[in-house]
Image (spheres, rainbow, N blue to C red):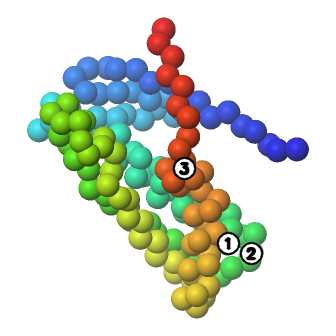
Amino acid sequence: MATVKTVKINSKWIEKNLIEVKAREHTVYVDQPEASGGTNKGPTPLEYLFASLASCFITIGLIVSRQKQLKVNGLSVDVEGDIDYDVLLGKSKEPRAGFYKIKVLVKVDGELTQQEKEEFVREVESRCPIADNLLNPTPIEVVVE
């Protein structure tokens, strides 16, 4: 039987563009740069998306390396992507609100051949829930209270 876990956060608007997010006993802040009307007290939602993807790759990489007893000494992940701000600002409806492409650069420091590193990263990607949700349409149910 599958192990299903519910992941939940609560968030609320504080001031200007500052948003407080509570995840379990942790509080993080999402904000915009001052030039965009924010207070610059935290990363933007887009930066958190990339942080989620990168940290998920590393977390799953640690799980896979332990399970397969691979000699991985270090993992780092850089993520970047281009987005058309005119859509999110309501100035245009095309081409889309999301990123055109997301590029993930995974650096594996370990006693592995290039082929072993590539196989390792492919398995990590296949098991990363954040990557899966970005690669595959996931229904979003929006309820207004």
Residue 88, image quadrant: top left
Q: Is residue 96 above or below residue 31?
A: below
Identified at 64% across, 59% down, the residue is 127
Crowding at label 3, few (<14), some or many (≥20) Cα neighbours within 10 Å? few
Using the image as rendered, state which of residue 24 and residue 100 is in the foreground: 100
CB contact under 8 Å: marks 2 and 1: yes
Task: Identify residue type, mark 2.
Answer: Lys
- Viewed as shown, does residue 126 lie left or right of 102? right
Residue 44 image position (x, y, % from top left): 31, 41
C-alpha separation, residue under disc 2 versus residue under disc 1: 5 Å
Per the image, label 3 sits on a secondary structure element best described as loop
Per the image, label 2 sits on a secondary structure element best described as loop
C-alpha separation, residue under disc 3 versus residue under disc 1: 25 Å
- Viewed as shown, does residue 123 lie left or right of 96? right
Q: Mark 2 points at which residue?
A: 68
Badge number at residue 65:
1
Q: Name the residue under label 3.
A: 136
Residue 36 image position (x, y, % from top left): 15, 36
Identified at 64% across, 69% down, the residue is 123
Position of the N terminus by quadrant: top right
Task: Identify residue type, mark 3.
Answer: Asn
Using the image as rendered, state which of residue 20 and residue 134 is in the foreground: 134
Using the image as rendered, state which of residue 48 and residue 110 is in the foreground: 48
